């Protein structure tokens, strides 16, 4: 991959059983004095003065009203994970001279949620992160998709999403051929073919901390999206799509019918 690309983002696949409203926006997960239930979008305005980071209406997804406290803690931590990562990244990458330039002011992080599947056993969302630095510079951070399995109380990984052969070289070529999207732009950027390692978090291009996987998956009512997103401002954000029936044989055989059920849920 190009040297200009930095550490990445993206594939936290996570699913949850959410019976209720979707797309509501709240600062505290309550509406009209009553706790909300189901898949909701809440906002965070927390300040981390020691890290020189401030959230401003930062959105994230929460599954409210789950009966199992342990499962609720796990899936909600996964869904909030992109925000927590952004605080760590902003602090860890702040150079001494930038800290001096900030003069005690904080960088502002804003996030915007795009909900995919939100009812049934699986909940999938992509969180686009933008930072307004307190120093002179740009703050383009990744869009990070996360999918949680409410029933199992866990976040889905690439191994949970795909058939094992799909993550091999030939399988990834077959997956790429099934996807629609800006492939000419990808080629113009001289990016390498996607590899299995791109679906896992890791340290990239000298970043001091681990970043989300560059390649992530979002599940929607229409089908699957493969989101390539990394830190940086050039050749760092691509979305490719495919209807479920086109990638059926490449997905985990037990996951596929659940995705169809989630897409059909009313």
Image (cartoon, rainbow, N blue to C red):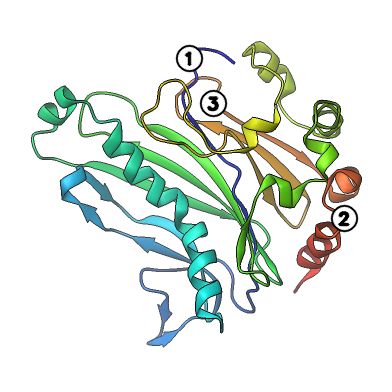
Q: Position of residue 144 (x, y in %)?
A: 53, 44
Which image quadrant: the N terminus? top right
| Residue 89, picture quadrant | top left
Residue at 56% of width from left, 21% of height from top? Answer: 235
Q: In front here: 105 or 150?
A: 150
At mark 1, the secondary structure is loop
Q: Which mark is in front, 3 or 2?
A: 2
User: Label 3 to label 1, Cα distance in Å?
Assistant: 9 Å
Q: Position of residue 150 (x, y in %)?
A: 64, 70
Q: Is residue 41 left or right of residue 103?
A: right
Q: Position of residue 106 (x, y in %)?
A: 19, 42
Which image quadrant: the C terminus? bottom right
- The answer to which of marks 2 and 1 sits earlier in the sequence is 1
Q: Residues within 10 Å of mark 1 (few under 14, many from 20)?
A: few
- Residue at image mark 3: 236
| Residue 217, picture quadrant | top right
């Amino acid at each position: 991959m190009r040297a200009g690309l930095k550490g990445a983002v993206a594939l936290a696949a996570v699913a949850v059983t959410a019976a209720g409203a979707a797309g509501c926006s709240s600062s505290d997960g309550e509406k009209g004095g009553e706790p909300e239930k189901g898949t909701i979008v809440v906002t965070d305005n927390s300040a981390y003065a020691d890290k020189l980071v401030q959230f401003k209406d930062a959105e994230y997804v929460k599954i409210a009203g789950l009966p199992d406290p342990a499962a609720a803690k796990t899936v909600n931590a996964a869904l909030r994970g992109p925000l927590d990562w952004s605080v760590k990244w902003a602090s860890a990458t702040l150079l001494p001279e930038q800290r001096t330039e900030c003069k005690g002011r904080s960088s502002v992080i804003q996030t915007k949620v795009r909900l995919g599947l939100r009812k049934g056993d699986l909940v999938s969302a992509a969180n686009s992160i933008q930072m307004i630095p307190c120093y002179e510079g740009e703050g383009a951070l990744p869009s990070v998709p996360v999918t949680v399995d409410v029933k199992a109380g866990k976040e889905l990984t690439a191994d949970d999403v795909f058939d094992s052969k799909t993550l091999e070289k030939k399988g990834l070529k077959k997956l790429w051929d099934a996807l629609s999207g800006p492939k000419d732009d990808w080629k113009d950027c001289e990016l390498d073919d996607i590899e299995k390692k791109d679906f896992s978090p890791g340290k990239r291009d000298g970043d001091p901390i681990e970043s989300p996987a560059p390649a992530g998956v979002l599940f929607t009512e229409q089908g699957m999206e493969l989101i390539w997103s990394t830190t940086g401002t050039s050749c760092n954000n691509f979305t490719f799509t495919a209807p479920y029936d086109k990638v059926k044989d490449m997905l985990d055989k037990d996951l596929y019918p659940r995705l169809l059920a989630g897409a059909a849920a009313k």
